[in-house]
Image (cartoon, coloured by chain):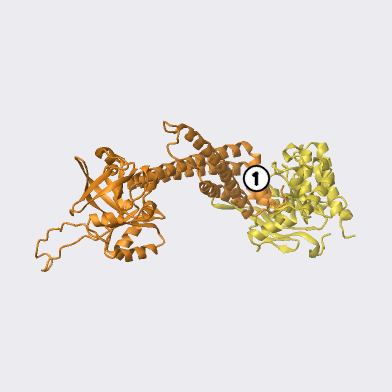
Chain colours: A orange, B yellow
Amino acid sequence: MHPWLPFEWIAATRFLREGRTQSLLIIVGVGVGVSVIVFMSALLSGLQSNLVKRTLSSQAHLVLLPAEEIARPQFGEGQALVQKQAQRLRSIDQWQALRGRLEKLPEIAAISPVASGPAFAVRGDANKSISLIGIEPANYVRVIELDQKMVGGELRVNAGEALIGIELARDLGATLGDKLRINASSGASDTLTIVGLFDLGNKAANARNVYVGLRTAQSLLDLVGGVSSIDLALHDMYQAEALSQRLNAETGLIADSWIKTNAQFFTALTSQRISSNVIRFFIGLSVAFGIASVLVVSVVQRSREIGILRAMGASRGQMLRTFLLQGGIVGLFGSLLGSALAWCFLALWRTLAVNADGTPMFMIEVEPGLVLIAAAGATLVGVLAALMPARRAASLDPVVAIRG
Amino acid sequence: MAETLPANAVLQLAGLKKSYLSGDSELEVLHGIDLTLQRGEFAALIGPSGSGKSTLLNLIGLLDRPSAGQLFIDGVETSTLSETEITRLRGQRIGFVFQHHLLIPAFTALENVMMPLLIDRGRPDTAMRARAAELLAGVGLSERADYPASKLSGGQQQRVAIARALAMRPSLVLADEPTGNLDTHTADDIFALLREVNQREQTTFLIVTHDPRLAGRCDRIVELVDGDIVSDRPHPIPTKHLPAD
């Protein structure tokens, strides 16, 4: 009997210890439930961040584009049939000022102005249609991790230098140090040296993207001083859609979030999350029913003891708390056991789910935060589950209980 | 004996009635009981089964509420008290010794004796432990202090239950067939122990018993038949153990 423990704690722990088998069984039951939740959560978040990383490897979280040009009829609405105007390549109006404003937004982690447009890459007889992308490398790598994607040469786009994808290099038969001629639709052309090769993990992007310096792109695309888009990285990528709507309203620019441009992928992620939440909810529910049923039996078994404690002056509140505590303790210990089990499952998973070369397919970790949430959640579920049996214990009539 | 100062009365019942709903009709079990117990009295409550003994004991023990009449414990009128006040009064002023011992098996003998103090004060302390040890010594069970309650014999359990009933230094100890489950020899020992406590501590006892042999050894015998007190006689020498002298 610890001197600093109040009566309720002493009674709760003694009752649990006395009904050792029951207590152990229900703690193991809670543990299995919690381990499934923790394991599933870790697996799912690992899987999702891996999927997101792969899918978004060559996309910005948010892209700002110039507003569409609209032909305005000179007469009133509806009196003339107006054909939709063809969209020419234009710069974002006053983008330098806009950049200054964007830098003040706390949600935005990185800003990269981009001048991009169509062009042809010519080498000998080969002639490939490409997407010419002018970047400031230092800013661009903070939005798209191009530095992680380099497979040869280096990430450098000074005047007269270009980075091409491995697919385009193969199509053109070109490699590092070779010259490449770029013909833009404006009629301008330039000869560039290939200083780096990249692999974005996407065949189409590897065949089309050619990175050059911002100024080189601006002069080739006839966008002197301008940029065709501003790519943004956010601190929380799931805020992209909300921010895009805000920026669209504030600036009048088109703001495309990754959520909108990858609507199906995002829906898949969301429905995966919802279904796992449903599973978690039902596991939590069955854990709660397990705890409740064990405590109901315990209250019935101990009704005489409860009666005698009440006769000795124990209040209804003391009896209530004694049984609520038992629920909480079972939940807490169950969750600790469950977290340990989940850790074992994950260790097993890491040895089983490996690529052919022995590296793990993707990283999954049990974060300490997840364990804390599981512990707090299971304790709360335990207390809630104990509510009904505890109220029953508190409302026992000592006369009836003692008579047995 | 009859003319006593109310201030000295540990228990006072005036016109106490209790009825239960039985189907549509009310069934009155106690028809207006008047009874006073003075400090230090050692009284037996006898009567045939169904006479209302247990009901009366539950009312006196504040485990149940009367339908009518007044009940004073140490001069405190209880009918107006709240549930919480009743529980507190019960814990502090009344000790129970039940027929079936009713120790809490999850605790040791010593901890069982401490239990009323622990419930009252909320947390264990050394003074409590010392008091419990002293009480256990008083019932001759010092060497069994750390035994789990479930490992004790029937007689030992009843001794622990008596020590527990005395933990709060109650004004009144209610004993419901305290020797009912014990063999004659052990029953005599237990009865002698109750008597000893009564004389040493001046604790008032009300003992419900079927056993005329035990009732005969009490100072006073109250007989209940069909919900009425039919006789209340001192036996054999009423004033011998009273503090009046």
Residue A292 seen by the camera: yes
Left of B98 or right of it: where is B143?
right
Return the residue nearer the eye: A138 or A12: A138
Position of residue B100 measured from the top left corner of the image (x, y, whole percent): 71, 42
Extreme residue toward the right, this view = B245
Position of residue A284 measured from the top left corner of the image (x, y, whole percent): 48, 44
Position of residue A323 measured from the top left corner of the image (x, y, whole percent): 60, 48
Return the residue nearer the eye: A105 or A349: A105
Position of residue A134 measured from the top left corner of the image (x, y, whole percent): 29, 53
Examine the image and state in which quarter residue A330 appears. Answer: top right
Return the residue nearer the eye: B242 or A323: A323
**SS type, badge 1:** helix
Residue B43 seen by the camera: no
Q: Which quarter of the figure is the C terminus of chain B placed in?
A: bottom right
Question: Label 1 sits on what residue type?
Answer: Thr
Q: In the rendered image of this protein, does residue A224 appear above or below residue B143?
A: below
Q: Residue at x 74, y 40 (%)?
A: B148
Examine the image and state in which quarter residue B76 appears. Answer: bottom right
Q: Which quarter of the figure is the N terminus of chain B placed in?
A: bottom right
Q: Residue at x 74, y 54 (%)?
A: B94
Left of B98 or right of it: where is A31?
left
Extreme residue toward the bottom, this view = A75
Return the residue nearer the eye: B178 or A79: A79
Pointer 1 residue:
A13
Would you call the spot at circle 1 few (<14 residues within 10 Å), some (14-19), or many (20 or more)? Answer: some
Please, which chain is the residue tagged with disc 1 on?
A
| Numbered circles on residues, count | 1
